[in-house]
Amino acid sequence: MKVIQPNCRIQFTPEDVNFVVSTLGNEAKTNDALCQLLSDEETRDSILDHERLYHALLEQRGCLRVSNHFYFYIMVRNVLRKAGIQDRTVADYVAEMLAEFSQADRSRCMINGGEQALDYFFEMLAALKTADDRTSFTIRAHIGNHSLFLAGVFPQRIRYRAEKRGFPDLRYYESLGQASFRAASDHRLAARYELGSIFCTLADRFQTTRLALNDMSDRLLSIGDFEQNLDSLLLPWKKEA
């Protein structure tokens, strides 16, 4: 199973650069300067924080010619900054997670030696009892990511199922996500992957991050094909109790 890394900002495409230039540039010299600045990490990050890019993504009509990595980074960075989470690596990590999970097959928990994916939290928690060191780390991280994804992007669906059918509410996802990110942050592999501080922030500020994503989800154009399978992944309470 893939360990998600904060890699959005190094995966931008030529179309992403063109979008930045067309949004912020207004003459040939400015366009050339922007292209040069975008190649430098520090100035690139400053440019990506420009409010005009965020609003251009929201207001763009028709098909957006940008990558998922660019789209999610700009959106996540904006809502997390407003929520008081200023660390760019946290925004980059959450954006990368959304880019991955926007494709339903990549949101599935596959472990080494397993014949089938672990689609449900109760299956993942059970697998922890016999998991080796690395697998335990990846499962903890996946549970944290999956909890944040579901509670952050689909809160209304969770509320409806909790109120009408007695299924787990948002507090359940928050509690599970916080505990999983905390356990992952304490694991020795968190240091190897340079994820310790990111997981600590997501554990400490899970609800803040979740609420920021709730705000963002109202503006999302699409979350890929994941929503087609969403109901089957929001587990019945009896299975999770």
Image: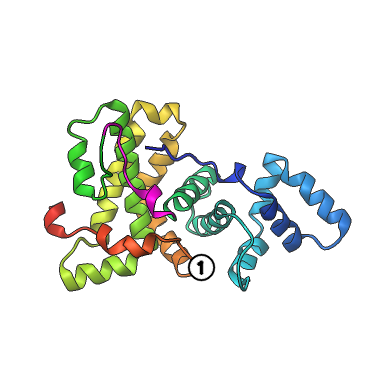
Measured along the vertical axis of the image, is residue 185 above or below residue 48?
above
Q: Does residue 197 sit above or below 205 in this rendering? A: above
Q: Is residue 208 left or right of residue 7?
A: left
Label 1 secondary element: loop
Q: Residue at x 37, y 64 (%)?
A: 227
Magenta stretch in the rendered image: 103-113
Where in the figure is residue 149, as x and y percent of width and height? 37, 55
- The answer to whether residue 185 is above or below residue 240 is above
- Residue toward you, 172 or 9: 9
Give me the residue at 62% from left, 67% from top: 55
Q: Point out residue 121 in the picture as x, y percentages from the top left corner.
A: 23, 49
Q: Is residue 154 found left or right of 170 in the rendered image?
A: right
Residue 240 shown left or right of residue 42 in the figure: left
Q: Mainly helix, strand or loop, the magenta region?
A: loop
Q: Which residue corresponds to the image point at 17% horizontal and 60% vertical from the top-left?
A: 236
Say if the magenta span includes residue 111: yes
Residue 77 visible, this orientation: yes
The three-letter amino acid code for the residue at tag 1 is Leu
